[in-house]
Amino acid sequence: SATSQPYRTGYHFQPPKNWMNDPNGPMIYKGIYHLFYQYNPKGAVKGKGSIVWAHSTSRDLVNWTPQKVAIYPSQPSDIDGTWSGSATILQDGTPALLYTGINPLHQQVQNLALPKNSSDPYLLEWVKSPKNAVMAPAPENQINASSFRDPTTAWLGVDGRWRVIIGSKINRKGLAYLYRSKDFVHWIKAKRPLHSAKNTGMWECVDFFPVSVNSPVGFDTSTLGPTVKHVLKASLDDTKHDYYTIGEYDHAKDIYIPDEGSLDGDSGLRYDYGKFYASKTFFDSAKNRRLLWAWLNESSSVSDDIKKGWAGIQAIPRAVWLDKSGKQLVQWPIEEIEMLRTNPVHLPSQDLKGGSVLEVPSVTAAQADVEITFKLSNFRKAEVLDPSWTNPQLLCSQKGTSVRGSLGPFGLLVLASKGMQEYTSVFFRIFKGQNKHVVLMCSDQSRSSLNPDNDKTTYGTFVDVDPVHKQLSLRSLIDRSVVESFGGQGKSCISARVYPTLAINKAAHLYAFNNGSESVTITRLSAWSMKKAHIN
Ligand code: FRU
């Protein structure tokens, strides 16, 4: 119940109990959405050897029906674990799953599974290929057998051959091996990897997909052409964050080249500057969009996870597309999630004076969706950005919620207790940079819980919005132990896991605040209570 399990979410995807990590093989098939996920049926910790592909289906991406486990260790090529992988819809419409198996030698190898009955839209039964493993480390290919995993959705070249990439590393160099196949069963490793980058370590859960240069529509993974750019994402095992670059896919040479200024690894862009890992996109052919799934792990202690009996949730799926600048992606929660909105509260436009707090009344603040937009003036008063302040996360932890500034901090206090003993704060701070104003976005978890065992790291990023000419918006999806925040209409995202001890259920509150000296204008403040979704 909500009282005994205050951290179970109301509308984020999770299994009834136990451990979940990566989203696997997302797809839409015959009008049904499928999500598989890494799952330990034996407990709330990751465990060894027992990981399976659990399976759920949905008509709307909001309400989910549990299905039986789709893939589990059963043959030599996967007997020690069925790890992450992806779905590809073949030319005849059949969905094929490629996934990593752990063999008895503890080598990582790639396996193929096909539906037993492809006329079943629920795809309940999967048959493993007798040809498994279909890709494996061998003396002649020099692949590191403990770093060869997580096949992507495949794409079809103009030569009629399928391509797939698999993450790996050679010493400290991260890379994506490329394989090609005519029949999806026999795979041949290409001489050159699709891409590599030095000093980035192991690339987990790589993802490679086309985006449109001039519209938010999504493309099928095999789409090429003059209005297409490509995105390559790697989940870096070293830092546990998902980084992407935007670039050109040279399909004649079968290599990917990031654009100038689009940097690989830790100096590059992230989907999310909080918790967000092992993400995977798929093309939703029903609505012509590309959707992004990702695992949000816990920030609680392992012993607390064992006590509550579960660990891991999935982020709300996000539509992703290329920003008009061409330099970054934009992400926005799927429109379907708005079907859960109820009891809207719209506050009139108003000034929020420096040092003031405004409660958003009549929402179930533990489970809510809130959008707030700020209009700013008095830019002369903005704090000067020291050129050495290049690390936004550090800046957010040094200039947290309670550190007064001039234009900011202003934003939302979510999952807050009445007496402010607990709150999570999502805010902006405006600085005067060299030749423009700089927007900092922070998610400050330092006061999120009185329980000292949680990881309360502060997160932060810069937002590429000009606050002089544009209003500054923030949306937060609040769901009991998760706060997913979207700044600047989805240009910067920060997700956090928090475990309040007082601000739970009906005792949670929601406020707008301004702790700067200058007042800011709220031009819009809309909040909704969120209904519970039917999840598993
Ligand atoms: C990422 C990951 C993958 C692997 C899976 C195993 O979180 O380590 O690289 O396939 O989890 O569960």
Image (cartoon, rainbow, N blue to C red):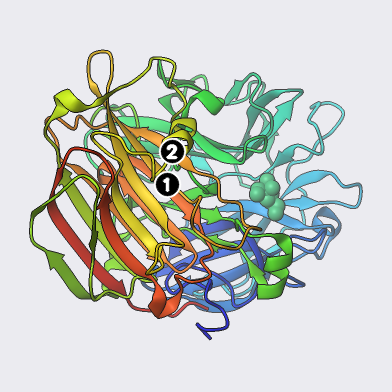
- Res. 460 mark: 2
Q: Which residue is mark 1?
A: 443
Q: Residue at x 46, y 58 (%)?
A: 315
Residue 386 shown left or right of residue 82 in the figure: left
Which image quarter: residue 223?
Answer: top left
Near mark 2 (Cα within 10 A), the count class, few <14, some 14-19 or many ≥20, is: many
In the rendering, at what x and y percent does residue 495 appear?
A: 45, 51
Give whichever of 370, 241 is nearer the camera: 370
Q: Tell which of 347 and 170 is nearer to you.
A: 347
Task: Return the disc, 2 or 1, that comes first in the chain's sequence.
Answer: 1
Along the horizontal axis of the image, is 53 left or right of 246? Answer: right
- Residue 318 position within the rendered picture, expressed as x and y whole percent measured from the top left: 37, 53
Task: Tell me residue 475's x, y (percent).
Answer: 29, 54
Asked if labels 1 and 2 touch by Cβ distance under 8 angstroms, the answer is: yes
Determine whether the residue tagged by mark 2 lies in a helix, strand or loop. strand
Q: Quadrant of residue 284?
A: bottom left
